[in-house]
Image: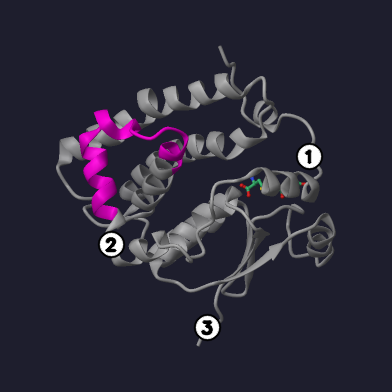
Amino acid sequence: MAAKPKLYYFDGRGRMESVRWLLAAAGVEYEEVLFETAEDFWNLIKSGKLMYDQVPMVEMDGMSIVQTRAILKYIAAKYNLYGKDLKERTIIDMYVEGMRDLNDMIMLFPFSLPEEKQKILNYILERATQRFFPVYEKALKDHGKNYLVGNQLSWADVQLLEVILMVEELKSGVLSVFPKVQEFKARVSKLPRIQKFLQPGSPRKPPMDDASLEAVKKIFKMDKSLFLQHVNIQIK
Ligand SMILES: N[C@@H](CCC(=O)N[C@@H](CS)C(=O)NCC(=O)O)C(=O)O
């Protein structure tokens, strides 16, 4: 029997959370090596397994895979969550890249400075409700199918549910003007593997609290507002 994939990351969502979601949707069991200190991270770097001295890293099928998108693409392709042909893959990529833009903003939000927080929150919610969710609402409405692409579960659906739940954590009720996305959320949440992942006690990680924020800052030696360093946007 093939070894279970092994995920290397800190004990939080960050960039690894979408990998956890996708493996859960694929029904793949995995192990996690969750490091807690800068020293743990440094020991991992010294092992030579991190191509760019960065995580996430997933050991799988004899590879030490880094770069979040590379990891996700491999899992999506391997477990038939990446469309049936090149055109479907491209459409899945277009959906997923938009969702990742939104996901990245939300991921970095806890690192913003207190004086930036409200503006950034408004910006994220505006982007979610005026740029991204209307796209998925229209797609679901236009083709009338249960899933975004090819009428079968794909990486795009899994990523969409993840990001919907993240936006709802920032502001409940954001889906009220997106009935098709609401139905989608209810439908996909009920798929047995996803339902299991959404249960308490699953490997799904909670939103970042103050303690984990401080731990992450220490592990990766961060001090300034990461949001504005990483996201190249002009906040009005
Ligand atoms: N493009 C990379 C970015 C990876 C990244 O920035 N990882 C952070 C943790 S989430 C890290 O390892 N930071 C340490 C460093 O860059 O030295 C990916 O998507 O995997």
Pick the front one: 119 or 72: 119
Mark 3 vs ligand 1: CB below 8 Å = no
Instruction: Label 1, secondary structure: give it.
Output: loop
- At x 37%, y 56%, the residue is 82
Label 3 crowd bin: few (<14), some (14–19), many (20+), radius 10 Å? few
Viewer-nearest of discs 3 and 2: 2
Q: Which residue position holds label 1?
A: 222
Colour scheme of the rendered structure: one colour
Residue 211 position within the rendered picture, expressed as x and y whole percent measured from the top left: 70, 47
Does residue 170 show up magenta in the picture? Answer: yes
Q: CA distance from mark 2 to mark 1?
A: 38 Å
Q: Quadrant of residue 221?
A: top right
- At x 62%, y 45%, the residue is 209
Question: Label 2 amino acid?
Answer: Leu
Residue at the bottom extreme, as displayed? 1
Residue 199 position within the rendered picture, expressed as x and y whole percent measured from the top left: 40, 62
Q: CA distance from mark 3 to mark 2?
A: 26 Å
Q: Earlier in the sequence, mark 3 or mark 2?
A: 3
Asked whether disc 3 touches disc 2, contact meaning CB atoms under 8 Å apart, the reply is no
Q: Is residue 112 visible?
A: yes
Q: Which residue position holds label 3?
A: 2
**Is 218 rendered above or below residue 7?**
above
**Is 232 rendered above or below residue 43?**
above
Residue 192 position within the rendered picture, expressed as x and y whole percent measured from the top left: 30, 66
Which range is magenta? 166-188
Residue at the left extreme, as displayed? 144
Q: Quadrant of residue 93?
A: top left
- At x 59%, y 33%, the residue is 109
Q: Earlier in the sequence, mark 3 or mark 1?
A: 3
Q: Which residue position holds label 2?
A: 191
Q: Earlier in the sequence, mark 2 or mark 1?
A: 2
